[in-house]
Image (spheres, helix red, strand yellow):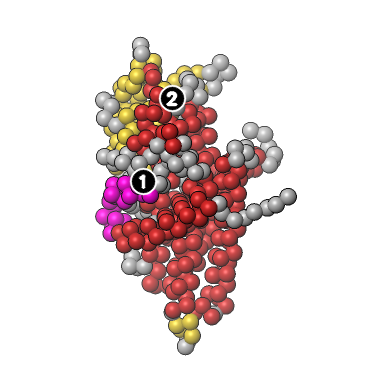
Amino acid sequence: MSLNYDLPEEAVMMRDSVRKFAEAVIRPKARELDEKQEFSPEITKQMGELGLFGFCIPEEYGGNGIGYVPYMVAVEEISRVDGSQGATVAAHNSLGIGPLYYFGNEEQKKKYLPPLCTGDKVWGFGLTEPDAGSDAGGTKTTAVKDGDEWVINGSKMFITNASTDACLGVTVQALTGTRPDGKKEYSCFIVENGTKGFEARTLHEKMLWRASITSELFFDDCRVPAKNMLGKQGEGFHQMLDTLDRGRLSIAAMGLGCAQGAYELGLKYAKERKQFGQAISTFQASAFKLADMYMEIEAARNMLYKAAWLCDNKRDEYKVLSTMAKLYCSEVAHRCVNHSLQLLGGYGLMKEYDIERLYRDQRLLEIGEGTSEVLRLVISRAIGCYKV
């Protein structure tokens, strides 16, 4: 019996190539794109050429099919430099491409997946609404059958990638009726960009991920063909929750990358900054902060990589571990950016220092794809504290 903690060769190659790309291409532009609140189709296309889309999609549909562990490594390396670009990769792979691959029929897969795996086009995930965030079952958007079409009315909020010109379409959860047990029935639909009655508007003046597109979606008697239903009628809620289980892995990877980036910035500064005649890294107050950061990052990385390995091996245990990894990695990132900014002192508050951006970018990691409070609820249910 053996226990091997070494990364597979493809993950090591991915880590090295993505780190070089992030340092050479993303870092020089990150501050400017953040200031301008500007999404970069060029960087997205380059990330596609590097193979950062379609990690879990077979080659027959345009992906590279190398799995979740290399995917986590790539998101970690991108997010180590810039949360906005990390969000583009994470949201497009997990929330955009994921539902189409796991729940789409053969026609849908062949039509949509190839262009989405190149970086030329992106896709949105329409779940959250103005009045339905943590309560995913509170969806008010409706879809009513009319002949061979479904008519969608409602709105969605905080949807990544949905209003850029590069967006090909969105997957939307809507209320389609009532189940035999009296509960609400939800179904998912594919809505292509340009469909009459569908509009996506970009949200501006965000605190964080300012170079990532965040959108509000509106459906006003939006008609889609019946063939645009994803899977079967009534399967929408299950599809969305299953997607979030996998999506939490990528958010955890963003948290891990953010923590690693913050740690590296803090360590470098602490070694260079001198006070009272010596580097501040030699003071116990600073050294202990860095030691805690290093320790927690290592623990977070092991939890996340294990969860990704379980997912690659189709083990159901990944679901609760992905929840734990997302919760832990996001909160480790919180502590690391806070420690690192404290080490930089006043300089950490200035935009010319990258920790200021990492500090802002971290905050959504404890909110998106399951707040820390809801994830603790999920975990407590999983360990049998009380019945659902």
Mark 1 — residue? Answer: 48
Q: Earlier in the sequence, mark 1 or mark 2?
A: 1
Amino acid type, label 1? Gly
255 and 130: which is toward the camera: 255
Q: Which residues are magenta?
A: 32-50
Helix, strand or loop at label 2? It is helix
Rendered view: 270 above or below 85: below
Rendered view: 365 above or below 23: above
- Can you tell which mark lies on residue 106? 2
Query: Is residue 14 at least partly visible in the picture?
Result: yes
**Residue 32, percent across and down?**
28, 59
Q: In the picture, which quadrant includes the C terminus?
A: top right
104 and 139: which is toward the camera: 104
Residue in view at x 31 percent, y 41 percent: 120
Query: Is residue 97 at least partly visible in the picture?
Result: no
Q: Is residue 225 left or right of residue 242?
A: left
**Residue 108, percent across and down?**
40, 26
The answer to which image quadrant residue 319 occupies is top right
Residue in view at x 30 percent, y 59 percent: 29
Amino acid type, label 2? Glu
The answer to which image quadrant residue 207 occupies is bottom left
**Residue 153, percent across and down?**
35, 25
